[in-house]
Every structure is written in structure tokens, then in C-alpha cells.
Amino acid sequence: YMSVLAPTASMAVTIFLAYNMCGLYGYALAALGMLSTMAIALTIDAYGPISDNAGGFAEMADMGSEIRDITDALDAAGNTTAAIGKGFAIGSAAFVGLALYGAYISRAQIKMVNIFDER
């Protein structure tokens, strides 16, 4: 659980600062900044299945143990990058979800949301 402490804290600080500096507009810009690197994040996330398929092809073609050792190392790296990509996707979804909620309450001109009121 310690591995999520720094990313969660940095996202919380970003949300706090963006909202305090520019309101909902600042928060929307923070979400846009998170999404601006999405092309690289998707590329990193796609590395895992590609390297796994390369290992499967090498095994089906009986290419030898040295090739399979290389593809196994690539597959291990691919699994690591896939985990990183998934964490980035979850963080992006949190940012965009809050930005969408902020856009909704702004457009609907809702002044205050009371989470303890069951109505």
C-alpha cells in the first residue's frame, strides 16, 4: 500500500492547488494535463501484450531456448509496464470524472451539494 501513497498525495495536492488557483477551470486544466500524455501511456500499456505474443510465437515456432529467454525477459518488462499504465489510467479517470462532475454542477448552477442530505 505504500506504493500508492506518493501518487495519491501528488494527485490530491494537484486537485487542491488547481481548484484554489482557478476554480473549476483550473481543475479542468489539470485533468487535461493528465490526459495530454495519454498517447504515451497507451503505448506503454500496449507493450505487455505485444511482448507476450512475441514469446508465444517464438514458442510455437520452436525457435530455441535463447530466443525464448529473451522474450521471457521482454514479457516480464511488459507486465511491469502494463501495471504502470493501468495505474495511470485509473488516475486519469479520477481526474476526468471529477472534472465532469464539476462541469455538471456548474452548468446546472448548483451552488452547494450536501452529501449528508438523502434527498
Image: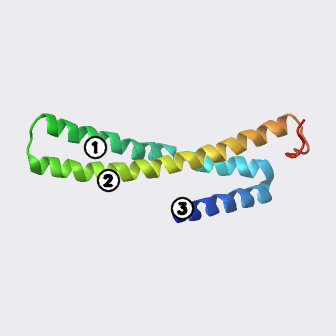
- The foreground one among 25 and 54 is 54
Left or right: residue 104 versus residue 94 is: right
Quadrant assignment, res 17: bottom right
Amino acid type, label 2: Ala
Quadrant assignment, res 106: top right
Element class at badge 3: loop
- The foreground one among 108 and 118 is 118
Q: Tell me whether circle 1 and circle 2 mark residues in contact (CB < 8 Å).
A: yes
- Residue 51 has which mark? 1
Residue at the farthest front position:
118
- Residue identified by numbered label 3: 1
Q: Separation of disc 1 and disc 3 at Cα?
A: 28 Å
Taking the image as drawn, is residue 37 in sight? no
Element class at badge 1: helix
- Residue 77 has which mark? 2
| Mark positioned earlier in the residue sequence (1 or 3) | 3
Q: Residue at x 24, y 53 (%)?
A: 73
The C terminus, quarter of image: top right
Q: Tell me where residue 99 appears, x and y as whole percent.
A: 71, 43
